[in-house]
Structure formats: C-alpha cells, structure tokens
Amino acid sequence: MDNPFCILSIFWHSRRPSRIENMPVVRNSFWLRKGYAALTFFGTVIASTKEDAKEFENKKSTLRNHEMIHLRQAQSTHDSWLLFYLLYSWYSIKLLPQNRKTKNAIYWLNPFEMEAYDHQDDLHYLDNNEATEWRQYARMKPSERLEIAKQKRMYL
Ligand SMILES: [Zn+2]
C-alpha cells in the first residue's frame, strides 16, 4: 500500500498557486478512488499509476490540462490553495442532497470540476483565460448545473 502520509510533505512544501508554473507529479494511489487517474493537491499532482503520471507529463494530454485548470482556478481564489479547497469542499457539501438522485453529484456538479471537464479537451483554454467560469456554475442551482452537464455530455 502507498504511504498515505506523503500528503503531509506536499502540504508542508506547498507554494502559492501563482508561484507554480509546472506542477510536479508523484505516484501514489492511496488518496485516489478507483477510476480516478490523478488529483491536484496543493500544487502537486498525485497520480494513481505510473502510466497516469506519464500521461500528466505529456504536455498535450487532457489529464494535464484538467489539472492545470485547477491550478488556475486556485489562483482565482485569492491565490490560496486553502481557500480553493475550502470552497471546493463547501460546494461538495452543498451537493450532498443531490447525491442521492444523481450518482456522484458532489463531484460531477462541483463548479470547479464542471469548468475543468468542460474545457479539458481545449488545450488552448488557459492561454488567455483566467479559469473563472466556475463562478457562474457556483451561482446556479444544482438542477440547472445538471441540465448543463447533460447537454454538454460532461459525464452522463
Ligand atoms: Zn478535477
């Protein structure tokens, strides 16, 4: 089993989102649910497998773009990882009632994930963009978000 405490060191050495250009990637599957390739944790990408880590290092990968969108989003939350994760958790908690009807709604309808999933295929999304679309999703009701997610085929 992978050492779960690796996140302590990452947290300890974390830097402000705006100071990070290239996120380092480490391989550790402990914090990843089955089926999830990677996650961004305080400026470091934690990849589930060696292949996923490699995929992240490929500059043209969707996976990389997805995580880089999260980095840019964290810059938009007063350049604070802490605020980013607080907001991320808050939006997830608010989606808990929805979770009964829509599988994994706390993840898929999270405003930060919706922006990332909607634009991860556009490798130029971050060229001149601040990645603040999540704010629009955050203002919507969960039902409205679900409609958009369905229309855009983000996951359903
Ligand atoms: Zn994500």
Image (tube, helix red, strand yellow):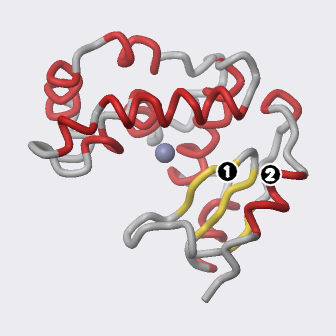
Q: Where does the image place residue 69, in percent across and percent down from the top left?
A: 58, 35
Tell which residue pokes out farthest to the left in this image: 101
Q: On the image, numbered disc 1 is attached to which residue?
A: 41
Q: Residue at x 37, y 35 (%)?
A: 93
Callout 1 touching callout 2 (CB < 8 Å): yes
Q: Residue at x 74, y 53 (%)?
A: 44
The dot on residue 11 is 2
Q: Where does the image place residue 146, in percent across and percent down from the top left?
A: 18, 30
Sequence-wise, which precedes: disc 1 or disc 2? 2
- Image quadrant containing the N terminus: bottom right
- Amino acid found under the numbered disc labelled 1: Phe
Tally the numbered discs. 2
Q: Residues within 10 Å of mark 2 (few under 14, many from 20)?
A: some
Report which quarter residue 144 is drawn in: top left
Label 2, secondary structure: give it: helix
Report which quarter residue 130 is drawn in: top right
Whole-number angstrom distance, CA of label 1 to CA of label 2: 8 Å
Label 1, secondary structure: give it: strand
Q: Residue at x 76, y 69 (%)?
A: 6
Q: Where does the image place residue 55, in percent across and percent down from the top left?
A: 60, 66
Mark 1 or 2: in front is 2
The dot on residue 60 is none
Q: Which residue occupies the foreground of this view, 17 or 88?
A: 88
Q: Residue at x 57, y 44 (%)?
A: 65
Q: Is residue 60 left or right of residue 81?
A: left
Q: Which residue occupies the foreground of this view, 67 or 28?
A: 28
Report which quarter residue 18 is drawn in: top right
- Amino acid found under the numbered disc labelled 2: Phe
Q: Is residue 108 left or right of residue 98?
A: right
Q: Residues within 10 Å of mark 1 (few under 14, many from 20)?
A: some
Q: Is residue 141 above or below residue 49?
A: above
